[in-house]
Image (cartoon, rainbow, N blue to C red):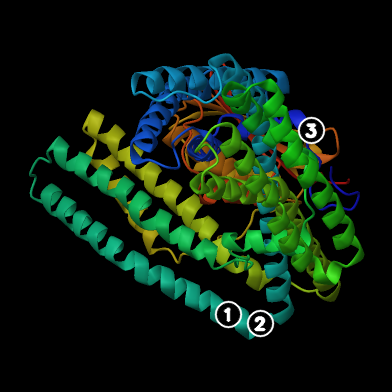
Amino acid sequence: MLAADSPLQPRTLRQRVGGAWSVAWATFLITAGLSLFALLVTEKGASTSTTPVLAWFIAWASAVGALVIPFVILRHTLFRNRVAHPLPVAVVVVKDVAFAVVYTTILTTVGDRLGVSLAAGFPEQLLANAFIAAWWSPALAYFMDYRQQVRQTRSLFTASEQALEEADRQQGAIIDRIRDDLVAEVDVELDPVRERLHQVDADVRSATASDEPMDREDWKRISDLLRQTAQDSVRPLSHRVWQRGGQRYDMPPWWMLPVTIIRQQPFRPIAFALIDIVGTLGPNVQQYGGPRAIVLVVVGLGWSIPVMLAANALMRRRPGVHAAIFLVALAALQVPVVARGYLRDLWVAGSGSVAWQVSQMLAVVVVVLVTSGFGAWRNREAAQLANLRAVVEEESEVVKERSAQIAILARETAQYLHGSLQTRLVTCSLAMEQASEIGDVAALKQALAEALSALDTQATPVSPARSVRDEVGRKIGLWDGFCEFDVTMNDDIAESPDHAVEVGRVVEEAISNAIRHGNASRIQVGVTIDAVGRLLVGVTDNGTGPQGGSPGLGTAYLAMVSEGSWTMEATEHGTRVLVPIGPAPGR
């Protein structure tokens, strides 16, 4: 649950559990690693002999490897649109239980062939693994979704903080100096590209002046050079300049999380008890019988639960010595391991060996850290977001009436490079390909001249249009002749200058992706008002659909301008991108 004043947008259980992390490689690998740890800690002989360890590792690798294919299939079929349309929690749980059944079956089969067998019987182990999967996998997906949301929110706060700090320091002379520095940096990067294209232009002019026919392969090489320039020179440069507009908020390293748990978190006795019962009851029943297995559970939890409850009460009353109480209690939780080891040795000689006790003590520490870890991480992130929000709110009062020009200058330049310049180079490349098909030398020379003009133009953002209609029209004009466009917007929106720059950039990014990556031939652009009064930009194309590439600068801009609420989904005939941008004109 989120606090009433939490900076995070509320999300439903279905969105968190049935969304992006329901079938993600990160959660798959984390779960696989923990399953191996549990196997080596709990199974007979795994902690005392090399041969069983190797056999169990092979069995585990076979079981996990067998899950990879159905995992990949689910990612591209039933769970394909999970980000835009999260699946019901019940569907996710059924999937997780099915995976547990497959895992346990193959693990048992391969283990039997290698001469090792589960301490618990197959039915008992199957039920235990199914129960753990039904709880663990949705919980992990929930945690990862929360973690991702915190990161996105932190990025938005950090960007706002950066803009406010820069705006507070900005002066006219500083703005000019920074602009000159950016232009100089871009010029240095693009000079080699300009030289290559000028040489190509000279070669083309020489060939046409001497009436030497140009080979079609030469034309293709020129077209490929423009594409390569856009991809390998302009694109990386735009990313570097974009990064100049933001800063990283220093985070404690991941390995500090256990320290945070010890200093701030209580024990979670219920979760600890469930893991202990599910993980040990079945094997103990198989090895010692039902009554003795229950004795082992009572011996363990009869001590551990009161210790945890007492420690939690003391830590609440004496927060100044929280870490000391936590460590003393953690040490006390090892007592049942020794007691259980004594009883196991008494009943079956050698089953409670020192090696077994050491492995169980390590397991106790891991379970405590895992069960208390999410709270520690969540509290740390919540405190950091609260601090960031406080800083942003305080600084926004100071610079409310000032310009934020310095803060956005680098990103404006990056957007120009990523959008307009890269787009013009790609359209010139497409024009050359068309000229090659019909043998039009004049069209080839014109496309090359336009590419040179784009590179020779000072790489700073062009002045924004005076209205949304003009800005959208300018972006569409870059692709004139390569695609059919259908634009809809009402007059109040079309003639307003509000958010014209943002709308234009969103349209530019969506069109560029649709044509360059989706081979779209028809694109519909709509600028409307959504149900909550926000300006909503929608771009729908008839291309090949989302390609699933890694997020880039364009994605970062869409997330920033929409506060993380933009969507992209496959349609029956292509792709639809929806990006809300601030309040609509007059709202």
Label 2 sits on residue: 172
Q: Which of the two residues, 298 or 438, is positioned nearer the viewer here?
A: 298
Q: Is residue 300 left or right of residue 72?
A: right
State the mark number for residue 176: 1
Local crowd at mark 1 within 10 Å, few (<14), some, or many (≥20)? few
Amino acid on which the number 2 mark rests in the picture? Gly
Please say if the residues under marks 1 and 2 sit with CB atoms less than 8 Å apart. yes
Q: Position of residue 294 (x, y in %)?
A: 72, 28
Q: Assign a secondary structure to mark 3.
A: loop
Label 3 sits on residue: 12
Q: Residue at x 74, y 28 (%)?
A: 14
Q: Which of the two residues, 541 or 379, is positioned nearer the viewer here?
A: 379
For marks 3 and 1, give the CA distance: 47 Å
Q: Is residue 558 left or right of residue 517?
A: right
Q: Is residue 396 left or right of residue 111?
A: right
Amino acid on which the number 3 mark rests in the picture? Thr
Q: Position of residue 73 (x, y in %)?
A: 47, 20
Amino acid on which the number 1 mark rests in the picture? Asp
